[in-house]
Image (spheres, rainbow, N blue to C red):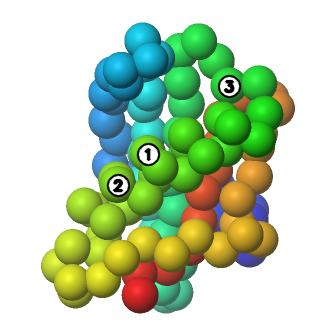
Amino acid sequence: MKTLLIAALITGGLGTTAFASENYEYGWMTGKIAGTSIIGANVVRKPAFKGEKDEQVQAMDKAKKALEKDYCKQSNNNFVADPGLIMFDKGINEWIVGGVCK
C-alpha cells in the first residue's frame, strides 16, 4: 500500500510551495490511489527534514491542509491520516502522509 501511495504521488498530483513563519520553505504534492479512497501528500522542506518526530507533526499539518483543499473540501469532509501510511523517506528527506477524507 505504501508503494502505491508513493507511486500515486509521483505520477500525478497537485504541487505547491509555501513559506512558514519559522523561516522554513515547504513544498508538497498531493495524489490519490486510483480505485481507492486513499489520498496522500509528500512534504519537503528547506532546510531539509531529518526525520525527527517534531518534523512529522509539521509535515502532517501541511499535508492535512493541502489534502483537505485538494480532495476533502468538495465532500465537506476532513482529512484523517492513517498511521500506517505516514513515513519518512531518508533518500530524499521527505515525509509521506496518507489517509482518507472522513
**Residue 34 seen anywhere in this rendered image of the structure:** no
Of residue 52 and residue 6, the one placed in the foreground of this image is 52
Q: Is residue 37 left or right of residue 87?
A: left
Label 1 secondary element: helix
Q: Relative to 18, does residue 70 appear above or below in the rendering?
A: below
Q: Is residue 8 left or right of residue 96?
A: left
Residue 67 point in image, percent of width and height: 37, 61
Residue at image point 43% right, 45% down: 62
Does the CB distance between marks 3 and 1 fall below 8 Å? no
Q: CA distance from mark 3 to mark 1?
A: 13 Å
Task: Report the amino acid beneath label 2.
Answer: Lys
Q: Is residue 10 left or right of residue 96?
A: left
Label 2 secondary element: helix
Task: Report the amino acid beneath label 1.
Answer: Lys
Of residue 27 and residue 64, the one placed in the foreground of this image is 64
Residue 8 point in image, percent of width and height: 54, 61
Residue bearing mark 1: 62
Density class for disc 2 (Cα within 10 Å; few <14, some 14-19, many ≥20) is few
Q: CA distance from mark 2 to mark 3?
A: 19 Å
Density class for disc 3 (Cα within 10 Å; few <14, some 14-19, many ≥20) is many
Task: Find residue 15 and report its image quarter.
Answer: top left
Density class for disc 1 (Cα within 10 Å; few <14, some 14-19, many ≥20) is many
Q: CA distance from mark 1 to mark 2?
A: 5 Å
Task: Report the amino acid beneath label 3.
Answer: Phe
Q: Relative to 96, does residue 73 appear above or below in the rendering?
A: below
Does the CB distance between marks 2 and 3 fall below 8 Å? no
Residue bearing mark 2: 65
Position of the C terminus, as image quadrant, is: bottom left
Residue at image point 47% right, 49% down: 61
Residue bearing mark 3: 49
